Image (cartoon, rainbow, N blue to C red):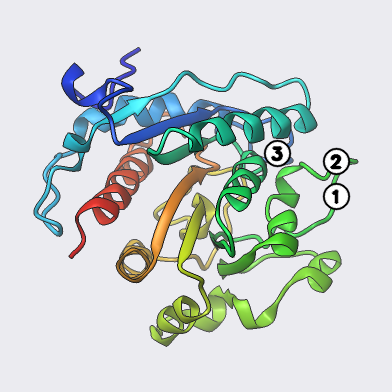
Amino acid sequence: MNRFFGETKDDYVSLEEANILLQSVPYDGTSTWGKGADKGFEVFLNTVPNLEFFDIETDAEVYKQGIHILPDIEERSSPEKVYQTVLKHTKELLKMNKFLTFFGGEHSISIGIIEAFRQQYNNLTVLQLDAHSDLRPSYHNSEYNHACALHKASQTTNLIQVGIRSMDVVEKPYLDKNKCFFAEEIYGTEDWMDKSIELMTDDVYLTIDLDALDPSIMPSTGTPEPGGLSWDTCIRYLKKVFQRKNVVGFDIVEFAPIDGLHAPDFLVAKLYYKLLSYKFYLK
């Protein structure tokens, strides 16, 4: 398996020289319907060489910033231990002064990552793109279940939610309607983009559950929900966020590949590369 980002050379990808770190957490222990998010990262890496590494929009080749792929976090024994391991590891990575990116795995991996960033940055905003609110305080006897992925952040950070279109009644007490932009309310409009960004603090951590996107373009996820974001809407919005805020890191989660269906694989690779292009080269 090629563990480099595409066909990049050693002078770009060494740990010392790279400006970007890519950490995989292939954990899929608490997902409750479609499985396979633990297989997503390998498919992602196999797809990356098929990208064009020149980004037209930013007139740049962001891979030259150096994208170093770290060894996978292999802890899978329990959601609690995954949280503890990811939290500890992320805190160590934050000491390296690199731009940190993460790849799931299911959405529960984000709990420890977000907590580490919260401890690093005062007044952190967490921007969640997702079909599901993920605000349960506990599910299946664990507060580190994928259904609880943003509960802790809702209590400790400035949480902005975009694309939500599915939730349980037990989550209502933890949902801030002023900071939640439901899919049905933003469909076909753009004013919500500026409104949501105005609610953000300077430093933003971005967590993207791929089921935020409509399943017509992203069926490869464990819990697809109709009515999601289009590619153009998603990218246009994220460009605004990167232009106006300091995005301090991001994760992409819940990619569960479907054998023989390659378009979603390419979408994920393109999304990751596009976010890096925005981070380093937007003017």
User: In the rendered image, which residue does mark 1 sit on?
Assistant: 138
Q: Amino acid at mark 1?
A: Ser
Q: How many marks?
A: 3
Q: Amino acid at mark 2?
A: Ser
Q: Is residue 188 above or below residue 38?
A: below
Q: Report the residue at 32% width, 52% height from top.
A: 275
- The label nearer to you, 2 versus 3, is 2
User: In the rendered image, which residue does mark 3 sit on?
Assistant: 31
Q: Report the residue at 20% width, 17% height from top.
A: 10
Q: Secondary structure at mark 1?
A: loop
Which of the two residues, 121 or 114, is positioned nearer the viewer here?
A: 121
Horizontal side of residue 237 vs 249, given as left or right: left
Q: Secondary structure at mark 3?
A: loop
Q: Report the residue at 68% width, 55% height from top.
A: 150
Q: Is residue 17 above or below residue 118?
A: above
Q: Residues within 10 Å of mark 2 (few under 14, many from 20)?
A: some
Q: Residues within 10 Å of mark 3 (few under 14, many from 20)?
A: many
Using the numbered discs, state the Cα–Cα distance from disc 3 to disc 1 in whole angstroms.
14 Å
Q: Is residue 229 visible?
A: yes
- The label nearer to you, 3 versus 1, is 1
Q: Amino acid at mark 3?
A: Ser
The quadrant where residue 133 appears: bottom right
Which of the two residues, 145 or 195, is positioned nearer the viewer here?
A: 195
Q: Which mark is residue 4?
A: none
User: In the rendered image, which residue does mark 2 sit on?
Assistant: 142
x, y percentage for residue 185?
54, 83
